[in-house]
Every structure is written in structure tokens, then in C-alpha cells.
Image (cartoon, rainbow, N blue to C red):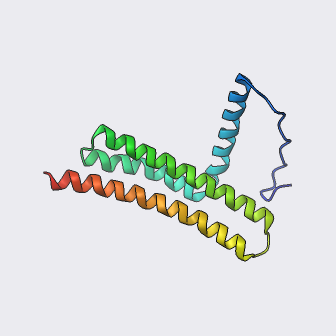
Amino acid sequence: MTPDDTPPRPKPAPVSGITHVFAAAGYSISGLRRLWKETAFRHIILGAPVCMAVLALANARFIDYCVMLILLLALVAVEALNTAIECIVDHLAPDWQEYARDAKDLGSLATLCLLCANGIFIGAVLIRSFALT
């Protein structure tokens, strides 16, 4: 059994061609379901419409929305990688280990950096919008 009391899934057989595309999509959906269990991810999902609303209030350009969406998707990707690191570390080091703490701290730093990038971008759009009016 895994730590969250779900039975382990069997290893899938290798596939190729169009079947691989559908299999990969299924793996991504499974990853999204797993990521939904993370509070930080749910905060990102709640924050995304807030970011878009701030851009709307600032009369942002279409390109600003595109950049914001790219930054938010990058944030989701980094949060997914951070969660993957935490899952592996928790499996390899159930007791406290310095390398485990370091790995988790570095994953957290990566997420923080992208959160800051999102904030800097929104701040720049706001400054441009309200400094020019």
C-alpha cells in the first residue's frame, strides 16, 4: 500500500503510435488528480482568475494575458515537479535526513521563484497601466 492507503497501480505495458498519445494524456490526467491533493496547487488554481481579473482592471493587452497564462502554467509545472520530488524523498527517507530536507527546500525555492516572477509581471503591468493614465 502507498502512504495514502491507495493500492499501487500495476506498471503499464509499453505502447507506441497513437496509443502512446492517449496513454500519455491519461498519465497527465492522473498527475493532475494527484496534484489536486496539494493545497499549494489549489491556491494556484484559485489565484489564476484573480490574476486575470487584475489584468482586466489594468486594461492589459492581449499579450499580457498570454504571458500571464504562460507564467501560471510554468508555476503549475514547477509545483508538479516539486510535488514529485517530495513524493520520492518521502519514499526514500521516511525518517528525517538532511538530504531530504535540502531536496524539499530546493523544490520549494523553485516554486517561490516562479511565484515571484508572476508577482513581478503583474506589478509591471499595473505600473505600466496606471503610470500612463
* Up/down of 5 relative to 97, above or below: above
Q: Determine which quarter of the picture holds residue 63.
A: top left
Which residue shows up at 75% across the image and 75% down it? Answer: 97
Which residue shows up at 67% across the image and 45% down it? Answer: 31
* 17 relative to 51 in the view: left or right: right
* 4 relative to 118 in the view: left or right: right
Which residue shows up at 79% across the image and 69% down it? Answer: 94
Considering depth in this image, is 57 or 132 the residue closer to the camera?
A: 132
Considering depth in this image, is 33 or 114 the residue closer to the camera?
A: 114
Q: Determine which quarter of the picture holds residue 13.
A: top right
Residue 10 rendering spot, x and y as whole percentages: 86, 42
Residue 79 rendering spot, x and y as whole percentages: 58, 55
Which residue shows up at 75% across the image and 76% down it? Answer: 96
Residue 30 rendering spot, x and y as whole percentages: 69, 42
Residue 19 rendering spot, x and y as whole percentages: 74, 25
* Up/down of 68 relative to 110, above or below: above
